[in-house]
Image (cartoon, rainbow, N blue to C red):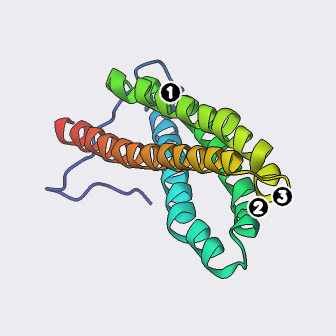
Amino acid sequence: MVFTQPEGSRKIPDMPLASSSATTGDGKKIGRPIVRTALWLLLGGWFGGYLLFGAVIAPTAFSVLPTSQIAGTLVGPVLAKLHLYGIAAGILLSVVSGLLGRHWVLAIFPLVLSALCFYNHFGVSAELAEIRNLTFGPEGSAELAARFGFLHRVSVGIFIAVGIAVTGLVALHAREDARSVASG
């Protein structure tokens, strides 16, 4: 059975990659759909993970667990995984954006977000983890509590900034996809 396009319907144009890609027997490019799928999976995972953590996991943990220390013990490892995902996703999104021939901003901006995730994970969160037990233990002091509070605010600020920026990346890539189809 052969499927044909109905008369009068709009054909989605073939959009070649910025670089070469494999072709099927009839010469059609097969790389671009795979690369675009990777782009949307990376963006969706990043956006969805941040949204779920910020809107559901963290607030729920801090509202139902008996102490903020226990809640922090729960959300800390989840946040660490989100930071690591952000580091990898930013690098991969940069590569994928380049392969798709997207505007240079869409290739560089994910690297900036990746660097923020790196700093938040290996800098801010690492120091928070170091002083957490000291701050809330018997040898805790007002100075340690102040430092912990400051670092926590910095970490939350970076998390929110990255989340907003990832939302912007989703919108910018959606606009690029719409333009490429419209200019077809």
Disc 1, SS? helix
Q: CA distance from mark 3 to mark 1?
A: 38 Å
Q: CA distance from mark 1 to mark 2?
A: 29 Å
**Which mark, by number, is residue 134?**
none
> Toward the viewer: 134 or 104?
134
Q: Earlier in the sequence, mark 3 or mark 1?
A: 1
User: Outermost residue toward the front?
Assistant: 142
Q: Disc count in the image?
A: 3
> Toward the viewer: 36 or 61?
61
**Which mark, by number, is residue 111?**
1
Whether residues under marks 1 and 2 lie with C-beta atoms below 8 angstroms apart, the answer is: no
Q: Residue at x 28, y 38 (%)?
A: 176
Quarter-wise, where is residue 70 in the image?
A: bottom right
From the image, state whether disc 3 or disc 2 is nearer to you. Answer: 3
Q: Is residue 17 visible to the viewer in this orientation of the structure?
A: no
Q: Is residue 62 visible to the viewer in this orientation of the structure?
A: yes
Q: Quadrant of the C terminus?
A: top left
Q: Residue at x 43, y 29 (%)?
A: 97
- Name the kind of residue labelled 3 in the image: Gly
In the rendered view, tell whether residue 17 sits above or below residue 2.
above
Q: Give the residue number, with chain letter if any, for mark 2.
A: 73
